[in-house]
Every structure is written in C-alpha cells, then in structure tokens.
Image (cartoon, helix red, strand yellow):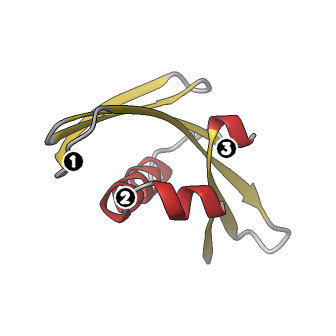
Amino acid sequence: MKHGFYMTKTIAQELPFTLQAKIWEMTLRRERADKMDYFHIFNVNMEMDICRITHTQEVPVFRCINEIELKSNKQHSYKIYVIRDDTLEGNHIYTMLFANEY
C-alpha cells in the first residue's frame, strides 16, 4: 500500500514544519487502528514554547492529545483537517488543509 501526502499552499507557508511533521505522524499512527475515519480534525493551540495538539475523529469516536515544544513567540490557534482519499488500487492519499480552506 502506498501513501501520498499533500498540503495546501497556505499550510506549507504558515504552519511550522515541525508541526506539519507531527500532524502527519499522528495521522499515520491512527491509521494503524482497526477502524479509522477518513476525516481527521486537529485543534492546535500554541502558547509560547508549548504546542498542544488535539486529534479527534467522529466515527469511531476518538480523541488524543499531544504536546510538543515549539519555539514561538506568539500565541495562536489553528483548526486543521487531514482528509484521506482511497484510490481504486487501495492506496491512501492524504491532504492537509486549514479548516477555512475546506
């Protein structure tokens, strides 16, 4: 099975690379579960050097919180979606975007 990973231009420009990598990691970790929704929701709260990421799904109900150190001098909140599309060959294509880009 192959995976394709894509992101919008806005994600690539505005979201720190470390945070992008952590969201991809959390998405793939969740994929190993027996049942997984195609729609991942990430609520990100950045406060100084700590970034709190809440990963949720609706079906089945899932919630996981991770914290990472991320050097930043600003406070910011993001809502990010990762959407999985399945190809006819059984591969997964993931797209990361801000909620307001959906």
Quarter containing the C terminus: top right
The extreme right residue here reads 88
Q: Are marks 1 and 3 in contact (CB under 8 Å)?
A: no
**Residue visible at 64% across and 36% down in the picture:** 99
Question: What distance separates the C-alpha of mark 2 from that of mark 3?
Answer: 24 Å
Q: Which residue is mark 1?
A: 72
Residue 6 seen in this snapshot: yes
Asked if disc 2 and disc 1 are in contact, CB closer than 8 Å, the reply is yes
Instruction: Give the residue at mark 2.
Output: 16
Of badges 2 and 1, nearer the viewer stands: 1
Which of the two discs, 1 and 3, sits closer to the camera? 1
- Please report the residue visible at 35 percent of the width from the left and 54 percent of the height from the top: 19
Tell me the amino acid under the disc marked 3.
Tyr
Task: Name the residue that disc number 3 marks.
Answer: 38
Disc 1 residue type? Ser
Looking at the picture, which amino acid does disc 2 mark?
A: Pro
The residue depicted at 17 percent of the width and 37 percent of the height is 48
